């Protein structure tokens, strides 16, 4: 025999409170003392009460779910960011649909369309590029952009230029005067800012050894491989940790010792960074803070706040490890 579903009325009756008070406690709304709220929640748990999400959606117009869209879940930066997004959303009573776009804009449009069709309350979006490719799909659905810069959207970012300057100045202070820059795709502003700032700092103090570009991948382009093989630099700043891992791997194959013959600094501080051999010196992004602000900003939009061109920028810091120690 199927067990009878516990209702909010059952919770109210068992807790000895009104139906309204039980609703306030469960939904974290209204004016209740902390003791009463805690008592109702304890009774609800003991009874095995579960909210009827379909009924709540019909009543409030909200599903209690948001979407999180990223370019590539094979990049270890994104699972870490997704975990922080999920944790913050869960703290606020929301579940999260996490999906990636495989770096393809047609796929990006399709996954956004799917999330809209599934009735998510809003989306945190890490676009492939700095452009609004989903305007006709998303309509007026609340969306917060993270990392990228897309006109018309509230954007949560790190101070990428600060990171590039920190990396370059650290290598210069460590005694390097032949420094190369290996950028990620330069068609996004965040990469241009980090690498542009690094190049500017290097050129002020010495001469740039080389500047080449690579995909967000450990697989290196021919230009990048040739630059490393040239041994023109004693240190390199890489626009992402994934690229830095690829650079260290290629250098080892060539018999180039890291850090003695080539110091390497990355950007992002992905979970792999401290477990590389040698451990990777890198620029740490405040992933938890950025994720929390992205979710909080989305929830504020759901509550009626509208700051379409607001841009929140978080500071970064350099994490010194074995791949780029100060030169003696």
Image (cartoon, rainbow, N blue to C red):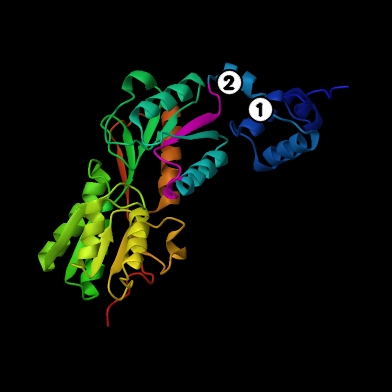
Q: Is residue 63 magenta?
A: yes
> Which quarter of the image is occupied by the C terminus?
bottom left
Q: Residue furthest front?
A: 254
Query: In the figure, residue 167 lies in which quadrant?
Result: bottom left
Cβ–Cβ under 8 Å for marks 2 and 1:
no
Is 179 left or right of 238, judged from the image as shown? left
Q: Position of residue 213 (x, y in %)?
A: 23, 50
Q: Residue furthest top?
A: 58
Residue at label 2? 57
Depth order, front residue of 209/219: 219
Which element carries disc 1, helix, strand or loop? helix
Query: Residue 28, image x and y in percent?
Result: 60, 34
Tally the marks: 2
Q: In the rendered image of this protein, does residue 178 appear above or below residue 267?
A: below
Q: Is residue 51 left or right of residue 160?
A: right
Give the image location of residue 220, x and y in percent: 30, 53
Q: CA distance from mark 2 to mark 1?
A: 15 Å
What residue is shown at x 65% (from left), y 42% (from top)? 34
In the rendered image, which residue does mark 1 sit on? 23
Range of magenta residues:
62-78
Would residue 161 be seen by someone viewing this image from the given angle? no
Q: Is residue 195 above or below residue 61?
A: below
Q: Is residue 70 magenta?
A: yes
């Amino acid at each position: 025999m199927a067990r009878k579903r516990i209702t909010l009325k059952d919770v109210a009756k068992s807790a000895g409170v009104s139906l309204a008070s039980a609703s306030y406690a469960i939904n974290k709304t209204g004016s209740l003392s902390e003791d009463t709220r805690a008592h109702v929640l304890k009774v609800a748990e003991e009874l095995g009460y579960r909210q009827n999400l379909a009924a709540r959606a019909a009543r409030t117009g909200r599903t209690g779910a948001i979407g999180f869209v990223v370019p590539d879940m094979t990049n270890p930066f994104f699972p870490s960011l997704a975990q922080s997004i999920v944790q913050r959303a869960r703290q606020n009573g929301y579940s999260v649909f996490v999906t990636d776009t495989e770096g393809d804009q047609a796929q990006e449009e399709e996954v956004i369309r799917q999330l809209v069709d599934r009735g998510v309350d809003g989306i945190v979006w890490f676009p492939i590029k700095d452009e609004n490719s989903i305007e006709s799909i998303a309509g007026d659905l609340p969306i917060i952009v993270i990392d990228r810069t897309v006109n018309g959207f509230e954007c949560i970012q790190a101070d990428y230029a600060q990171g590039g300057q920190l990396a370059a100045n650290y290598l210069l202070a460590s005694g390097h005067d032949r420094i190369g820059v290996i950028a990620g795709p330069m068609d996004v502003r965040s990469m241009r800012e980090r690498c542009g700032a690094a190049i500017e700092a290097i050129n002020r103090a010495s001469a740039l050894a080389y500047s080449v570009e690579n995909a967000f991948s450990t697989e290196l382009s021919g230009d990048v491989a040739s630059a490393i093989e040239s041994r023109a630099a004693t240190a390199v700043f890489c626009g992402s940790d994934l690229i830095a891992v690829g650079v260290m791997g290629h250098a080892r194959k060539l018999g180039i010792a890291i850090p003695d013959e080539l110091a390497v600094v990355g950007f992002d501080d992905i979970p792999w960074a401290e477990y590389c051999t040698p451990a990777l010196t890198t620029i740490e992004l405040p992933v938890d803070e950025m994720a929390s602000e992205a979710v909080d900003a989305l929830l504020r939009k759901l509550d009626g706040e509208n700051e379409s061109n607001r841009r929140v920028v978080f500071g970064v810091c350099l994490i010194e490890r074995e791949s780029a120690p100060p030169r003696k």
